[in-house]
Every structure is written in structure tokens, then in C-alpha cells.
Image (tube, rainbow, N blue to C red):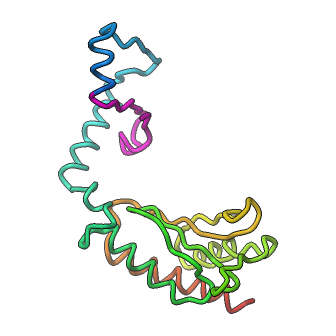
């Protein structure tokens, strides 16, 4: 797997290739070499940032906090808070894992009928949320490439339970505001 971005917490460019034991053994017992090279390979500042990030992730147990199936985790708290929004008539589904969630919007909850794309329901909810100080990522086209509205919600692993409660409240108010305008 090729990975990057959060490896150095955004402080410095850093990427990595993660291999299974089987793949490592194939290289080790095959040619024995893995030839690669990039302009910034093994850059000391990037590697130091990566080491500090990994140390922090381990010390603060951020991986455990991002497990939405662990009852006491931050991610589980987020999951519960977002699931509460299912009570709103325009929320058709809430789905996700860890700290990446989506709220899907529908015009008819019984039939799960999407809103017309011209209505831009998710964009309007995102704007109403922004006016309350909450940033979410609106998306359209999840049903067929054109129809279907949802929001992506992805807070950082260091989000607090109080911040989650506040964000869910603001999102609920934004959804209600836009729904009332229909």
C-alpha cells in the first residue's frame, strides 16, 4: 500500500510503501534489492517529523480513538451523535467507519427518493452549517452520478466529545433550516 499525507502530520512531505511479510520476503530472497530513489528520499526533516508523528499516535492511542466499534472511543462518540440525526425527516442514511462518515439526504424517507440535483440540498446544508461555524464536505451524484446528496464528515482524531456534540448540534440545526425552506 502506498501512503502519505498524515505520516508527518502535514509538517513535511513524507510518503511510504507498506509491504506484507510475504512481499518483503519475496524481495529479500529474490534479488535482495529494492531499487528506488526520489529527490527527497530519506530527507532528515521529513523523517524526524514522521517519527514524532508516529510517537504521538502511539502515546495518545489515536488509532484506538479512531475505532468506531470501540464503545468508549471518540469515533464511536461521533457515530452515535450522527446516528441521532436519523430522526430528521430528510436524513435518509448515516454510514461510515472510524472518523469518516456521511449523512445522506432524501426527499421521501420511506422511498429514499433523492432530491432533484438542481436543488443542491447538500450544498445548502453545508452553507447553513458554515454559517454556524461548522465545515462539512457536500457531495452530489451518489445515486447515479447526478442524483443524490450527502455530506462527508471527517474530524481529526484529536476531536473532543464536546466538539463532537457541538458539531452534531450545528449540523442538525443546519439540516432543519434547509428542510424547512422546502
Image quadrant assignment for residue 139 = bottom right
Which of the image's four quarters has the C terminus?
bottom right
Q: For the point 39% across and 30% down, which residue is it?
A: 17
> Magenta segment: does it hold 7?
yes
Query: Measured along the vertical axis of the image, is residue 18 above or below residue 165?
Result: above
Residue in the image at 69% along x and 86% along y: 108
Q: Is residue 112 magenta?
A: no
Place of residue 80 in the rendered image (x, y in percent of width and height, measured from the top left): 38, 78
* Extreme residue in the left direction: 59
Residue 28 lies, with reference to residue 2, above or below; the image says above
Picture coordinates of residue 109, whole percent (x, y) = 63, 86
Extent of the magenta region: 1-21
| Vertical order, 55 against 31 (above or below) | below
**Residue 36: where, in percent of width, then height?**
42, 14
Furthest residue toward top: 31
Q: As displayed, is residue 31 above or below residue 87?
A: above
Q: Is residue 179 left or right of residue 36?
A: right
At 66% from the left edge and 72% from the top edge, which residue is drawn? Answer: 122
Amino acid at each position: 500500500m502506498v501512503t502519505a499525507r498524515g505520516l508527518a502530520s502535514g509538517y513535511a512531505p513524507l510518503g511510504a510503501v507498506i509491504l506484507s511479510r510475504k512481499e518483503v520476503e519475496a524481495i529479500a530472497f529474490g534479488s535482495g534489492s529494492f531499487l528506488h530513489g526520489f529527490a527527497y528520499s530519506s530527507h532528515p526533516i521529513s523523517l524526524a517529523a514522521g517519527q514524532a508523528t508516529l510517537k504521538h499516535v502511539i502515546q495518545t492511542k489515536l488509532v484506538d480513538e479512531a475505532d468506531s466499534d470501540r464503545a468508549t472511543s471518540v469515533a464511536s462518540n461521533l457515530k452515535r451523535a450522527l446516528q441521532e440525526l436519523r430522526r430528521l425527516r430528510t436524513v435518509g442514511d448515516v454510514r461510515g467507519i472510524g472518523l469518516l462518515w456521511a449523512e445522506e439526504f432524501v426527499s421521501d424517507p420511506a422511498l429514499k427518493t433523492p432530491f432533484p440535483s438542481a436543488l443542491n440540498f447538500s450544498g445548502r446544508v453545508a452553507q447553513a452549517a458554515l454559517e454556524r461555524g461548522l465545515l462539512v464536505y457536500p457531495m452530489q451524484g451518489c445515486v447515479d452520478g447526478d442524483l443524490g446528496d450527502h455530506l462527508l464528515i471527517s474530524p481529526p482524531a484529536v476531536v473532543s466529545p464536546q466538539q463532537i456534540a457541538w458539531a452534531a448540534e450545528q449540523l442538525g440545526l443546519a439540516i432543519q433550516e434547509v428542510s424547512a425552506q422546502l
